[in-house]
Image (cartoon, grey):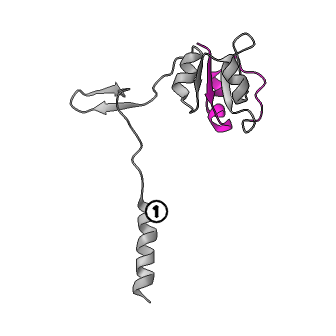
Amino acid sequence: MKIAMRCSREQFDAIKDRLTNYDLITNFDKAPYLINCYRQSSITNLTYEYANAWADEFYDEWNEEIFLKACGIETENVFQLYSESLNEWLDLSPDRKYRIKPDHSKEIAELERQIEILKNK
């Protein structure tokens, strides 16, 4: 599948080790669309106009999984969860959302510090 997708330098750097055929990567501020169909299926970044002309599918938002699959690179889930009831490790389900639980302890400590300052005034 020929695909063009808006991408930043940071997003590209996060996947470039998994790519084998990228070339001519330039300034993402001027050429923000990563394409997988340039010069014999090489991956590069282009301006909106050029990327739109080369690709069959065009995305304005980055999606690592879609882009890698379009390049023929299988994405793998590196996280698992342990089920106490089944007594085994399970792969995370793709139809659910997961996150690392937020740690608000610094914000709470700062608010408590501000309360103490106000109490002492």
> Relative to residue 47, is residue 117 depicted above or below?
below
Residue drawn at (57%, 21%) of the image: 68
Percent x, y of residue 82: 31, 32
Q: Quadrant of residue 2?
A: top right
Is-magenta flag for residue 6? yes
| Residue beneath the point at 54% across and 29% down | 63
| Whole-percent x, y for residue 61 in the image | 56, 33
Image quadrant of residue 97? top left
Q: Is residue 82 left or right of residue 64?
A: left
Q: Which residue position holds label 1?
A: 106
For residue 121, side relative to residue 5 (left or right): left
Image x and y of residue 45, in percent? 72, 27
Quarter-wise, where is residue 60 in the image?
top right
Of residue 28 and residue 11, the one placed in the foreground of this image is 28
Which residue occupies 53% across, 23% down?
66
Query: Which quadrant: the N terminus?
Result: top right
Residue 57 vs residue 74, the one in the foreground: 57
Classify 10 Å Cα crowding around label 1: few (below 14), some (14-19), many (20 and above).
few
Q: Quadrant of the C terminus?
A: bottom left
Q: Does residue 20 appear in the picture of this structure? A: no
Three-letter code, disc 1: Lys
Label 1: element kind: helix
> Over which residues does the magenta segment extend?
1-27
Can residue 119 be seen in this snapshot? Answer: yes
